[in-house]
Amino acid sequence: MRLKTWTATSAILLCMLPGLSQARDTTLNLPFEKVVQQMLSERKLDGSVKFYLAGVQPKGKVEVLRANEFTNKKTNAFNKSDEAACEWALQSALLTMQDAARKAGANAVTNIASYYKKNERKNPVTYECHAGAVIAGVAIKGDLSRVD
């Protein structure tokens, strides 16, 4: 009986603390190419699929095989900086897109845009990430393409 009372009292007190009753959702716009290069150097990406943000035109002829493929990845942000958690989420998204491109016979993902909560944001340098106290998330969409 005492344990139930103590648990209920603790829960009420925690809800009264500022910030704990409201979820944090910080929007960050971070450098995309930094994460791609890091993944290539760590061999997490093998280089068989290239990634091009919207506004960055690949050299050569582009044939779109499948348009508007998207992925939405979340990661545990607890005890990580917002930037580190966001980079981890983007890494997961890029691995998913690399696999989808390979399956489609594509060698590139072109026209990549941030697509968080289905709100499209195109930028030729950065990606959008949303970081909270516990979770960080990245959603991207792009075209699975063949670049010759």
Image (cartoon, rainbow, N blue to C red):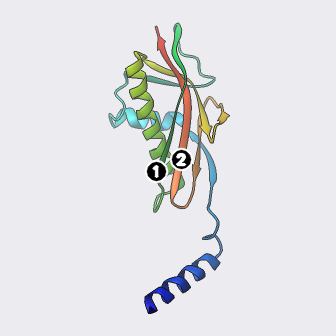
User: In terms of secondary structure, where does tag 1 sit?
Assistant: strand
Q: Amino acid at mark 2?
A: Gly
Q: Position of residue 23 (x, y in %)?
A: 62, 62
Q: At 32% from the left edge and 34% from the top edge, which residue is drawn? A: 43
Q: Is residue 106 left or right of residue 115?
A: left
Q: Is residue 132 left or right of residue 78?
A: right
Q: Is residue 14 above or below residue 96?
A: below
Q: At 39% from the left edge and 36% from the top edge, which residue is drawn? A: 39
Mark 1 surroundings: few (<14), some (14-19) or many (≥20) residues within 10 A: some
Q: At 45% from the left edge and 62% from the top edge, which residue is drawn? A: 79
Residue situated in front as seen by the camera: 67 or 4: 4
Kindly check if marks 1 and 2 are in contact, taking CB atoms under 8 A apart as contact. Answer: yes
Residue situated in front as seen by the camera: 96 or 57: 96
Q: Earlier in the sequence, mark 1 or mark 2?
A: 1
Q: Is residue 93 above or below residue 9?
A: above
Q: Position of residue 48 (x, y in %)?
A: 37, 21
Q: Which residue is mark 1?
A: 75
Q: Which residue is mark 2?
A: 137
Give the quadrant of the N terminus. bottom left
Q: Amino acid at mark 1?
A: Thr
Distance of mark 1 from mark 2, alpha carbons?
6 Å
